[in-house]
Image: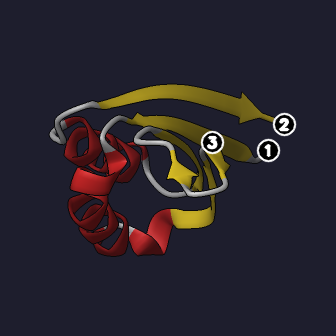
Amino acid sequence: MADTTILGVLLRKRTRTSESFQEILSRHGCIIKTRIGIHQTSNNVCSPDGVILLDVVGSESDIQALENDIKSLEGAEIQKMSFTF
């Protein structure tokens, strides 16, 4: 059996928190398989909020440590999906 865990992160005011968020991702980089960033954009306008999808692997304690670090950022929200197959 394999486990797949996806963390969906809503990052508000991402232009102010992106540096701290990137530091967190770098610190936990060994458990992040895939990272996808989604935000609204158009000509000369960049959304202040964004959604980041993280496909993570590792122990539950490693994943929980990543979640806790992300939750420490002002304006960050997390939703988690876990699948076993």
Q: Considering depth in this image, is 38 or 53 the residue closer to the camera?
A: 38
Q: CA distance from mark 1 to mark 3?
A: 37 Å
Say which residue appears at 15% left-offset and 39% top-offset. 72
Which element is circle 3 on? loop
Q: Comparing marks 1 and 3, which lies closer to the viewer?
A: 3
Percent across and percent down for residue 5 are: 61, 41
Q: Earlier in the sequence, mark 1 or mark 2?
A: 1
Amino acid at the residue labelled 3? Gln
Amino acid at the residue labelled 2? Phe
Identify the mark at residue 17; answer none if there is no mark. none
Q: Marks 1 and 2: CB-CB under 8 Å?
A: yes
Identify the mark at residue 40; answer none if there is no mark. 3
Residue under pointer 2 = 85
Percent across and percent down for residue 19 are: 25, 67
Residue under pointer 1 = 1
Q: Comparing marks 1 and 2, which lies closer to the viewer?
A: 2
Which element is circle 2 on? loop
Percent across and percent down for residue 52 are: 54, 47
Look at the image and name its color scheme: secondary structure
Q: Residues within 10 Å of mark 3 (few under 14, many from 20)?
A: few
Q: Is residue 36 left or right of residue 69?
A: right
- The outermost residue toward the right is 85
